[in-house]
Amino acid sequence: MRIVICVKEVLDPDAVNNYAIAGRLEIGDDGMSLTQTAIPKLINGFDEQALEAALRIKDAGVDCELTVVSIGEDPAKILKHCAALGADNVVAIQTDASALDGHGVATLLLKQIEAGGGADLVLCGRQASDDDQGVVPALIAERLGQPLVTFARAVEASGENLKVIRVVPDGDEVVEVALPAVVTVSNELGEPRFPTAAAKIKARKVKPQIVSPADLGLGDADLAPRIQMVKQFVPTVQGNCEFIEGATPAEQADNLLARLREESLLS
């Protein structure tokens, strides 16, 4: 069974939030990019959980090969992290990812999947933590002509089929899908594993397979964005806190209810 996991390198979302709360997050003169260079980059959290889902399938005894693919000018760091976690192959599509929209990203990933011999299962994170769009997996599935199952919190392979537990507003939904398929993994899957020290040392020697868009038969016209960012801005972050007074807990509760009624939050 061939499993391809698509991963993205993003700015550390916790660091970005801390800068924003402190009022230190700044947009450059182009109005679209951040000026901070101290914010570290790491693997998108949802994509790391997609890799964890693949590793759990392998742990369950399924004979499979795990290939991780990423797009960027130098995604070697996160790819070595994936190798340390247990990926069998790592592929870097070397190009400026910031110049691509969802269609361009999906096109590159699709062509690499086809060039690598196809996939029985494509796993992606439910969305990227930087743009929160979550459109790439759907575009890959559409182009491959394969079913798409979203928001998975558990994935189990059984022969030619896949059992997926989906996260839905009312709880969980269990579905079965015939392979090949595309599945997006949500954070409800649980915490991903950490690589061992020995695996991290071994992964330092791993050299990702480097692929260019030209190697995949793609030119500028094939990757021209259909959607372009016009402006990015940092919203004003304000925090307001009101303490409810009262001599006893019961009095505090009564005062809280009265305050909520004043705000028409309770009838």
Image: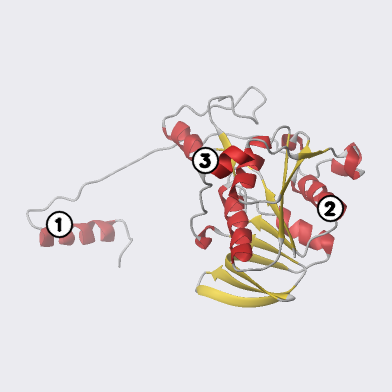
Question: Which of 10/54 is in front?
Answer: 54
Visible residue check, residue 10: no
| Amino acid type of the residue that numbered disc 2 sits on in the rendered structure | Gly
**Quadrant position of the N terminus in the picture:** bottom right
Location of mark 3 (residue): 13
The image position of residue 120, as x and y in percent, is 77, 65
Question: Height in image: 57 above or below 158?
Answer: above
Residue at the image point whose x is 58% and y is 27% from the top: 27
| Amino acid type of the residue that numbered disc 3 sits on in the rendered structure | Pro
Location of mark 1 (residue): 252
Query: Looking at the image, how many numbered discs can be counted on the residues?
Result: 3
Binning the other alpha carbons within 10 Å of mark 2 as few (below 14), some (14 to 19) or many (20 upward) gives few
**Quadrant position of the C terminus in the picture:** bottom left
Location of mark 2 (residue): 116
Q: Are marks 3 and 1 in contact (CB under 8 Å)?
A: no
User: First in sequence: mark 3 or mark 1?
Assistant: 3
| Amino acid type of the residue that numbered disc 1 sits on in the rendered structure | Gln
